[in-house]
Structure formats: structure tokens, C-alpha cells
Image (spheres, grey):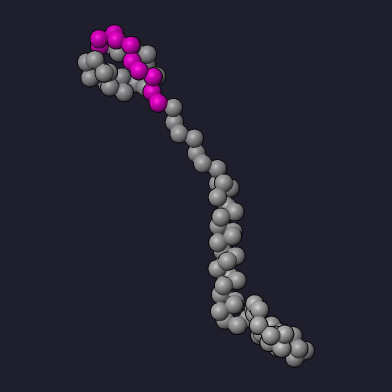
Amino acid sequence: MDCPDCGTWNPDDKIRCWRCGKELPKPPEPKKARKAGSQTWVWVVGILVLVLGTLVQCGVLRIGGSGDDVGLIGSVLSAF
């Protein structure tokens, strides 16, 4: 940290400037790291929406429509 009075570099753990003796300002506290799980639910919901949307677009999953339209999964299961 540089002394605000004389501009001399001082280690961060020092309270006074070694050259001019003036009291140094306290160094800023390091920022706390963000928790990894704080936004996990956003990613889970986003991936779930993406997967469900892909399944609907591919015709694997049918939403709404008539009861006769069972979709690809129903067709495969009825074949067994």
C-alpha cells in the first residue's frame, strides 16, 4: 500500500509509513466468495425447461391435444 502523504510503498500489515511516520489507512477487507449453491436452482430450472421443450418439439412428450394422440413414448410402450 502506498502512503497517501509521501507515496512510499508500505507492506499491507504496517500501521504507519516507514518513511514519514504518518498513520496508514486500513486496507480494504477482501471480498467474500460467493457460495457455489446460491444460483444452482436457477440452472436446474433452466436445464429442465430446455429438456422439456426439446422433448415437446421432438414429439416425445405431448402436452394438450386429443386423448388419441399418445406420442412417441406411448407408441413404443404399446408395442410391447
| Residue at (25% x, 11% y) in the render | 19
In the depicted structure, whether residue 4 falls above or below residue 64 = above
Image coordinates for residue 18, horizontal then vertical, percent: 29, 12
Along the horizontal axis of the image, is 4 left or right of 15? left
Residue at image coords 76%, 88%: 78
Left or right of residue 46: residue 4: left
Judged from this view, the residue extending furthest toward the bottom is 79
Residues drawn in magenta: 19-28
The percent position of residue 73, horizontal first and vertical second, equals 69, 83
Q: Is residue 11 above or below residue 78?
A: above
State the residue lying farthest toward the top. 21
- Magenta-drawn stretch contains 24: yes
**In this view of the protein, can residue 76 be seen by the observer?**
no
Quarter of the image where one finds residue 26: top left
Is residue 1 among what the camera can see?
yes
Q: What is the residue that sits farthest to the left in this orientation?
A: 6
- The image quadrant where one finds the N terminus is top left
**Residue 80 percent location from the top left of the image:** 77, 89
Q: Nearer the viewer, residue 59 or 24?
A: 59
- In this orientation, which residue lies closer to the viewer: 9 or 65? 65
Left or right of 16, for residue 75 = right
Choose top left, top right, bottom left or bottom right for residue 41: bottom right
- Tell which of 14 and 40 is nearer to you: 40
- Left or right, 2 with respect to 63, comes to left
Question: In the figure, residue 48 lies in which quadrant?
Answer: bottom right
Q: How many marks?
A: 0
The dominant secondary structure in magenta is loop
Question: Is residue 25 inside the magenta stretch?
Answer: yes
As drawn, 33 above or below 41: above
* Residue name at image x 45 percent, y 34 percent: 31
Residue 44 x/y as whole percent: 59, 59
